[in-house]
Amino acid sequence: MTVRRINLALQGGGAHGAFAWGVLDRLLGEPDIEIAAISGTSAGALNGAALAAGLAIGSGRHGRQAARENLDYIWSQVGQVSDNAVVRWMHSMFPVPRAWQRLTELFSPVAWLESLTRVFSPYDSGPFYTNPLAAILREMPHPDLCRAGGPELFVSATNVRTGLIRVFSGAELSVDAILASACLPELFRAVEIDDPATGRREAYWDGGYSGNPALFPLYSPALPRDIVIVNINPMMRDALPKSPAAIQDRVNEISFNASLLAELRAINFVKRLHAENRLSGRPMKNVLLHAIMDETLMNSLNASTKLLPAPGLLATMREAGSRAADEFLRQDAANIGERDSYDLRAVFG
């Protein structure tokens, strides 16, 4: 059996991250696919942490089963949050009068949540603030993020002070690093972590603002050439957004795809230089790109569904991810180690 080694790049996107759950579950069922490294942001960081910690248990069936257990646990916990539970959770974070609480439960929690976060800050909750993701990460069946033996894991967060990306890896990986990567500032307080490079305790927000996900950590010569991007934010939307909500949704999608598109443009430029033999003798890696996505599904959704991790939605996303991974394995797995299956020329014209 020929083992095909890949790197994974996992995008963030709230509840839509369950799509990557399905992708990863399907890839774990392929014994000839070896995951060498993972770069993840936000929900992609949660998926990456669950995957890497599980695979560190062992390289065979035991490690793959441990990774599945971690992923199933994380998304089962997220899926227990119902519409009204979202409202009750937000009530615990913000000082809202009791009469207003009863009224808001009659309406869509997403519409209410979006309005409320324009008025209140996570810092308004005082000593009652908690981040519900922390307990989920700490109580994974296999929680050791720094255990040797698994794939390399890179987790991206955005430095609030500088606006620059910070990539956590190796001994820097922690629950706080994952929380930083998934820290939407309208919902969560910035996560503060010491930075040995600056000698300061820095505050971090969601990594999607600066790298969704970051590809450059996967360029290491020690890692395989192949990078499989699991996209959960649609690149293309043919319909022109006209309502305020649709306009804001598309602005957010464009913003969270901007860093990835910049890296893809740079890769495309390097590929042209390689094709013209202009990089002879220079240590610049010519990576091979692949993608697993379902643009039709993602175009049928809007940003509000990212905030409502209802079990039905998560099951739909997981099944779609599994189908997309199955299609990738049928059509493009033979390209691993040989050629790109993601056509950058079609992206950039």
Image (cartoon, rainbow, N blue to C red):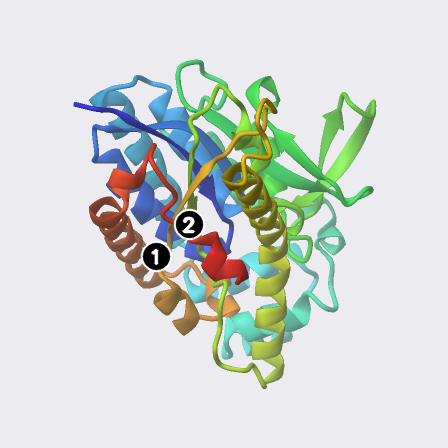
Q: Is residue 246 above or below residue 34?
A: below
Residue 124 horizontal/vertical position (percent): 75, 55
- What's the distance in space between the residues labelled 1 and 2, CA to CA? 9 Å
Residue 212 horizontal/vertical position (percent): 57, 48
Could you tell me which residue is drawn at 59 percent across and 85 percent down?
Answer: 243
Residue 111's quadrant in the figure? bottom right
Contact (CB < 8 A) between labels 1 and 2?
yes
**Mark identifier at residue 279:** none
Q: Which residue is mark 1?
A: 314
Label 1 sits on a secondary structure element that is helix
Label 2 sits on a secondary structure element that is helix
Residue at the farthest left position = 1
As drawn, is 287 to the left or to the right of 28?
right
Q: Residues within 10 Å of mark 2 (few under 14, many from 20)?
A: many
Residue 277 horizontal/vertical position (percent): 54, 35
Q: Which residue is mark 2?
A: 78
Three-letter amino acid code at the position of disc 1: Leu
Could you tell me which residue is drawn at 60 percent across and 56 percent down?
Answer: 256
